[in-house]
Amino acid sequence: MLPGKVKAVVDNPKKISNLIDLVNLPSTLREFMGQSRTSRLGCFKHVWSYIKKHNLQDPKNKNIVNCDEKLKSILLGKEKVDLAELPMLIKLHFPKQPK
């Protein structure tokens, strides 16, 4: 992360709270995670651990994840996902909270 971006996140507590606030999970994510509440950051860490544990990274290109059926259920049914789009796909499960 670039120094300017770190400062922007640190200076804006709302951005941090969006990552760490616990939220009730939708049913598909709840089944995948095995819990009913987590933060967006916690969810990302769980998905990343799942990818590593089940060896789902493409051996030829580690930036690509080959999704199994369980992972497809939370990543819009995609067969393959680029690591760069993974946070965006997870974020879709965490709608913005009303002000």
Image: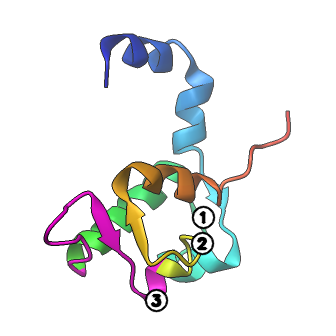
Residue located 45% across and 17% down the image? 10
Give the residue furthest to the bottom: 69
Q: CA distance from mark 3 to mark 2?
A: 11 Å
Q: Is residue 68 left or right of residue 30?
A: left
Query: Which structural element holds mark 2?
Result: loop
Which of pointers 1 and 2 lies earlier in the amino acid sequence?
1
Instruction: Return the x and y of residue 59 as percentages of the image width and height.
Output: 14, 72
Q: CA distance from mark 1 to mark 2?
A: 20 Å
Query: Answer yes or no: do the residues labelled 1 and 2 have beta carbons within 8 Å?
Result: no
Q: Using the image, tell me which numbered label, if any, was put on residue 52.
A: none
Q: Is residue 25 left or right of residue 80?
A: right
Residue type of the residue flagged with mark 3: Glu
Which of pointers 3 and 2 lies earlier in the amino acid sequence?
3
Q: Which portion, as a residue range, is magenta?
A: 54-71
Residue located 48% across and 21% down the image? 9
Give the residue furthest to the front: 60
Q: Residues within 10 Å of mark 3 (few under 14, many from 20)?
A: few
Query: Which structural element holds mark 3?
Result: helix
Q: Nearer the viewer, residue 91 or 35?
A: 91
Q: Disc 2 designates what residue?
A: 76
Q: Residues within 10 Å of mark 2 (few under 14, many from 20)?
A: few
| Quarter residue 7 falls in | top left
Q: Using the image, tell me which numbered label, if any, was put on residue 37.
A: 1
> Would you place residue 55 above or below residue 84 in this image?
below
Q: Using the image, tell me which numbered label, if any, was put on residue 69.
A: 3
Residue type of the residue flagged with mark 1: Arg
> Would you place residue 26 above or below residue 70 in this image?
above
Q: Main secondary structure of the magenta part?
A: loop
> Would you place residue 51 above or below residue 44 in this image?
below
